[in-house]
Image (tube, rainbow, N blue to C red):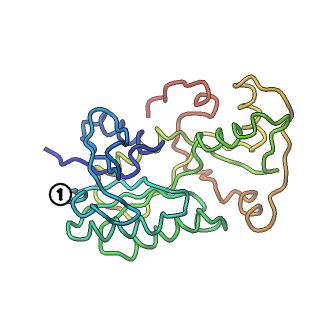
Amino acid sequence: MPLPILVTGGTGTLGRAVVARLAEAGRTARVLSRSERSAVDAGCDRVRGDLRTGAGLADAVAGSEVIVHCATTNGRGDVAATRNLLHAAGRGHPHVVYISIVGSDRIPLGYYRAKQECERLLETGSLPWTILRATQFHDLLAALFAAQRRSPVTLVPAATPFQPIDVRDVAAELTRIAERPPAGRVPDIGGPQVRTAADLARSYRAATGRRGAVLPVALPGRLGRGFRRGWNLVPDGGAGTTTFEEFLTGAPAPPR
């Protein structure tokens, strides 16, 4: 019988989707948590360990053949957390599956730089690894628009394309990767549509019944140029199936 798969960040947006997808695939997930109070989904185990300090990680990762590393602090502590995880896992030599971001090696954003450093830790370390880069999640764009819900206008980056993807599509790909041998960098994954930020914002306002204009504002410097040039896209490899509108209406993910 296959051993459980350890999932870091298993109570987060992506991690919960990974745990659910593993269950659908008949695999048992172990969710790494630093607190007994953290809520975990039914049907999965909880193991204690703190990625920030490394406390308890050696026992938490013991016996794991595969670790799906979804935990993130939006860059603030990602590098230290990944370093602690890899150090603790070194004795058991598990396959580490890491989720990164499309364009993180080209767009000068602090969070992206942290993702790149985490990738380098895997690439230069001793453990077998697979890295999957994904485009922005639907949830991220929806949260950015929702943060402006009290404003009469929604500000968006001008002339900037996005290819948002549903976390369930990413979770399905991570599950497939977790059941295969280590593969290094695998092809990037993106959503089914490439659309401007303004267009996506209008869809959000329509779906949530909000009025008001969408105002494009130019992002400055290299950051803005990187997004406008589409370095955050996977134009020839979009494998996601759920559109932004389907996400907003809560439609079930189409079968893949």
Question: Residue 251, how many percent across, how many down?
Answer: 54, 24
Q: Nearer the viewer, residue 38 or 232?
A: 38
Mark 1 Cα-neighbour bin, 10 Å: few <14, some 14–19, many ≥20: some
Name the residue located 84 percent from the left edge and 46 percent from the top edge: 216
Q: In this view, does 95 lie to the left or right of 162?
A: left
Name the residue at the bottom extreme.
124
Residue at x 30%, y 67% (from the top left corner): 128
Question: Can residue 172 be seen from the camera position used here?
Answer: no
Up-down: is 59 above or below 151?
below
Which picture quadrant has residue 229?
bottom right
What residue sits 27% from the left and 61% below the top? 56
* Three-letter amino acid code of the residue under disc 1: Gly
Residue 245 visible from this viewpoint: yes
Q: In this view, does 213 lie above or below 180?
A: above
- Seen from the viewer's position, the closer of residues 89 and 46 is 46
Name the residue nearer the viewer: 187 or 46: 46
Which quadrant is home to the C terminus?
top left
Q: In this view, does 121 lie to the left or right of 153?
A: left
Which secondary structure lies at badge 1?
loop
Does residue 194 appear to the left or right of 64 in the view shown?
right
Image location (x, y in percent) of residue 40: 34, 38
Residue 74 locus on image (x, y percent): 55, 57
Q: Name the residue under label 1.
A: 63
